[in-house]
Image (spheres, rainbow, N blue to C red):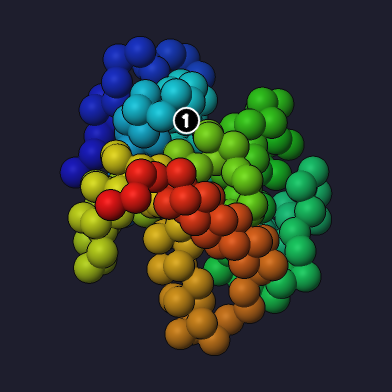
C-alpha cells in the first residue's frame, strides 16, 4: 500500500504535502492509494524518459482529484475548463473526470503550469503527438502498483523499455475496452492510436533488416 511518505524525498515540498493532504480528505482510501502510486510511477517514468519528475509527480498525484465527485459537479467544472471537452467526451461520463481535474487544478488550486494541467486533462483519452509529460502520466495511470489487470506486467515492461510502443499498445487496449463497453470513443483517442501506429511503423522502417 502506498503512503504519502513513500514518495521520493525530492518531491516532498509544501506544495506536494498540501496536495497530498487535500486528496487524503477528498478521496476514498483506494483512490488515494492509486493517486500516490500513479505519482510515484510518473516520477519513475519521467526520470527514465527525460521529462520533469517533479511536474510528473504533481500531475500524477492530482490526475484523479475529481474522480469521486458527482457527475453534476464534474460537468460544472468541465464547462469552466480552459481545455474544452469534445462532443464524444461529453457523451462518455467515465472520461469526464480528466477534464474536470484540469479545471479544478486550474481554478481551485491555482495551478498555471499548462504542461501539468494538460497531463491531467488527457490522462483518460490521449491525443496525437502527446508531450513527454502527457505520455508519462498516461502510462503511469496504467502501470501503477495497485493495478492488477491481466496485461499490466506487459505494459510495465514496455513503459520501461519503449515508451512509444507502450503508448501504442495501451491505446489499442483502451480502444478495445471502450468498444466492448459500447461507449463513445473520442476522436482524440483514435487520432492518438493512428499517430503512435505511424511512429511504430517509421521505427520499423529505420531498423536494420534481419
When the figure is inspected, residue 53 is found, relative to residue 127, above or below; the finding is: above
Of residues 39 and 70, which is closer to you in this image? Answer: 39
Q: Residue at x 66, y 68 (%)?
A: 186
Q: Nearer the viewer, residue 170 or 98?
A: 170
Which residue bears the numbered disc 1? 56
Residue furthest front in the image: 209
Residue 103 x %, y %:
70, 44
Q: Position of residue 49 (x, y in %)?
A: 41, 29
Q: Looking at the image, is 189 positioned above or below residue 140? A: below
Q: Is residue 78 above or below residue 206?
A: below
Quarter of the rendering occupied by the N terminus: top left
- Residue 141: tell me if it is visible: no
Going by the image, does 164 lie left or right of 189?
A: left
Question: In the figure, residue 129 lies in which quadrant?
Answer: top right
Secondary element type, mark 1: helix
Quadrant hosting residue 93: bottom right
Relative image position of residue 75 (x, y in whole percent): 72, 62
Amino acid at each position: 500500500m502506498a503512503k504519502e511518505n513513500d514518495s521520493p524525498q525530492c518531491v516532498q515540498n509544501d506544495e506536494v504535502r498540501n496536495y497530498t493532504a487535500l486528496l487524503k480528505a477528498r478521496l476514498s482510501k483506494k483512490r488515494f492509494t492509486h493517486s500516490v502510486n500513479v505519482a510515484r510511477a510518473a516520477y519513475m517514468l519521467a526520470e527514465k524518459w527525460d521529462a520533469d519528475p517533479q511536474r510528473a509527480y504533481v500531475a500524477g498525484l492530482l490526475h484523479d482529484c475529481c474522480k469521486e465527485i458527482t457527475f453534476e459537479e464534474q460537468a460544472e467544472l468541465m464547462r469552466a475548463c480552459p481545455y474544452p471537452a469534445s462532443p464524444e467526451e461529453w457523451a462518455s461520463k467515465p472520461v469526464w473526470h480528466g477534464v474536470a481535474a484540469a479545471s479544478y487544478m486550474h481554478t481551485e488550486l491555482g495551478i498555471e503550469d499548462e504542461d501539468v494541467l494538460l497531463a491531467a486533462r488527457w490522462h483518460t483519452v490521449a491525443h496525437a503527438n502527446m508531450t513527454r509529460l502527457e505520455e508519462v502520466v498516461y502510462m503511469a495511470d496504467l502501470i501503477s502498483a495497485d493495478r492488477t489487470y491481466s496485461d499490466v506486467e506487459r505494459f510495465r515492461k514496455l513503459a520501461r523499455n519503449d515508451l512509444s510502443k507502450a503508448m501504442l499498445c495501451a491505446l489499442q487496449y483502451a480502444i478495445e475496452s471502450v468498444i466492448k463497453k459500447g461507449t463513445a470513443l473520442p476522436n482524440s483517442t483514435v487520432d492518438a492510436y493512428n499517430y503512435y501506429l505511424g511512429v511504430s511503423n517509421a521505427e520499423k522502417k529505420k531498423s536494420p533488416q534481419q
